[in-house]
Image (tube, rainbow, N blue to C red):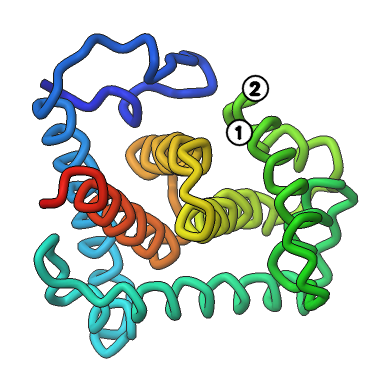
Amino acid sequence: MNYKYSIINPMENKQLYMYSEYHGIEFISAYKKNRISALKMCLKRLKNISDPKDKIFEVFKSFTFNGYNKESIHILYLELIINKFNFFKNNDVKFDSEIIRDMNFILFDKIGNKSFKKQKIDKLIKIFEIKKSFSEYFEKSTSANRLNNQFDEVFHLTFSYVLSEYFSLLKSFKYLSALFKINDLLIYRLNNQNFINLQLLSCSIGLELITFDETKKDILGN
């Protein structure tokens, strides 16, 4: 069977996992195949445009389910996100949107008010579950800019990082479900659009696969 959720455009075909047919282990196998294929595609494209000594290749050179360095992926993922936000700031990219202010608060605020941050994350999840994308908020709140599409990607990839973090902390499956869905959208874009942030997407997929594997072991014990 095929994992269909990243093949169809989730913004036009809003299918829910809960209403899918039951396929058991076949569905899990199709999901893993889909994610590993997307990760390989990202790394293959990066090899054509990046320095062979880039950190991304070192981090993923021996990535398997039985051997991976979660901490290295996590560190690189966050470093890439922060670099991107600094890049937009230095290029005077301004977005007047509440969801962007919320994401900035979640990532960079040092107050440590976890309860308040969770409220903001849960609000973003609710918006995403309804809209299946945050893109329309950028279109409404920004002026034409060559970096808009790139920021759109980075925001969705940052949301993926935050979901991974909060699922690891709280073990609430609403975060894992939203993580699968945000990456379905991003992989659909990878296959059908000129995707820019391949390093970030590699980290996003890698971290999701690790999170899934750890969760499976916690539940099944193997």
Residue beneath label 1, please?
A: 133
Task: Name the amino acid type tagged 1.
Answer: Ser
| Residue placed furthest toward the right | 96
159 or 70: nearer the viewer: 70
Q: Position of residue 207 (x, y in %)?
A: 35, 60
Give above or below for 11 relative to 33: above
Residue under the image location 79 percent in, 46 percent down: 99
Q: Position of residue 79 (x, y in %)?
A: 53, 80
Q: On screen, 125 above or below 61?
A: above
Nearest the viewer among 146 and 168 is 168
How many residues crowd mark 1 within 10 Å: few (<14), some (14–19), many (20+)? Answer: some
In the image, residue 205 above or below residue 175: below
Give the Cα separation between the discs numbered 1 and 2: 8 Å
Q: Residues within 10 Å of mark 2 (few under 14, many from 20)?
A: few
Write down the quadrant of residue 2 in the picture: top left
Q: Which mark is residue 130?
A: 2
Residue type, numbered disc 2: Ile
Residue extending furthest toward the bottom? 53
Image coords of residue 5 (percent x, y): 34, 25
Q: Secondary structure at mark 1?
A: loop
Using residue 124 as the reference point, say whether residue 16 is left or right of it.
left
Placement of the N terminus among the 4 image quadrants? top left
Q: Residue at x 67, y 37 (%)?
A: 135
Residue 152 bears which disc, if any?
none
x 22%, y 46%: residue: 216
Q: Is label 2 in a helix, a strand or a loop?
A: helix
Residue 190 image offset from top left, x and y in percent = 37, 44
